[in-house]
Amino acid sequence: MKIIAVGMNYALHREELKDKSTWSDPVIFMKPESALLKGGNPFFIPSFANEFHYETELVVRINRLGKNIPARFASRYYDEITIGIDLTARDLQASYRKQGLPWELSKGFDGSAVIGDFVSVGNYKSIQELNFSLCNEGNVLQKGYTGDMLFTVDEIIAYVSQFMTLKIGDLLYTGTPKGVGPVAIGQELEGFLEDKKLLHLPIR
């Protein structure tokens, strides 16, 4: 099982991170399977960094084997979605990027790919017309709308499948909107797709 993630897929998130890079294709990075943390299990803040951020995202689960998938057929390769959190060691990432080094360690550590309960994509009119949010004890920390993606879900699948075969069970984290922020001990993070709670993450 692969965890494939998209960076900088919302314009306002790029602005808040002061990202000035230019590109014409999706920014792709990977997380190892050991990064997976199912909702309900706590995330224990590690000691190897000083600042860990939540990045709330729509997550798509691949349900068919596929390679070189045209975007117009990409919707055939998933039928379930959920809310996930791409936890990021922000101070490490900033240091690596400043030095021009790979920043996988700031994204791929154990427990950094939080996943909620999956629901059928058929419950919704369009995967590109979904609202999602992250809350802590009723207070909204982050919210997004999939229609604001720079690259759609189907475009991402088409792009990634040029390079690697997608397999059943692979997870695609589709990018986070603006509003990322630090996690803190004692938080009880809850992820919502529209008005349905799919994720609960205690921070310890």
Image (spheres, rainbow, N blue to C red):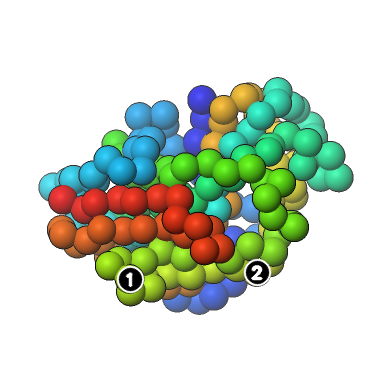
Apparent side of residue 196 relative to residue 44 in the rendered image (left or right): right
Q: Which residue is found at the position 36% from the left and 66% from the top?
A: 135
Q: Element under label 2?
A: helix
* For the residues bearing labels 1 and 2, Cβ distance under 8 angstroms: no
Please indicate, yes or no, whether residue 109 appears anywhere in the rendered image: no
- Circle 2 Cα neighbour tier, 10 Å, few/some/many (<14 / 14–19 / ≥20): some
Q: Which residue is found at the position 44% from the left and 45% from the top?
A: 116
Please tell me in which quadrant of the rendered image residue 21 appears: bottom right
Please indicate, yes or no, whether residue 138 appears anywhere in the rendered image: yes
- Circle 1 Cα neighbour tier, 10 Å, few/some/many (<14 / 14–19 / ≥20): few
Query: Where is residue 66 drawn, in percent x and y?
Result: 74, 27
Query: Where is residue 88 drawn, in percent x and y?
Result: 34, 53
* Of residues 16 and 199, the one drawn nearer to the viewer in this rendering: 199
Of labels 1 and 2, earlier in sequence is: 1
Q: Which residue is found at the position 70% from the left and 42% from the top?
A: 157
The amino acid on which the numbered mark 1 sits, given as a three-letter code, is: Gly
On residue 138, the disc is 1
* Of residues 139 and 30, the one drawn nearer to the viewer in this rendering: 139
43 w.r.t. 63: above or below:
below
The amino acid on which the numbered mark 2 sits, given as a three-letter code, is: Asp
Query: Where is residue 59 drawn, in percent x and y?
Result: 55, 47
How many marks the image carries: the answer is: 2
On residue 27, the disc is none
Q: Which residue is mark 2?
A: 148
Q: CA distance from mark 1 to mark 2?
A: 24 Å
Q: Element under label 1?
A: loop
Please tell me in which quadrant of the rendered image residue 8 appears: bottom right
12 w.r.t. 82: above or below:
below
* Of residues 49 and 72, the one drawn nearer to the viewer in this rendering: 72
Q: Which residue is found at the position 65% from the left and 69% from the top?
A: 148
Apparent side of residue 196 relative to residue 88 in the rendered image (left or right): right
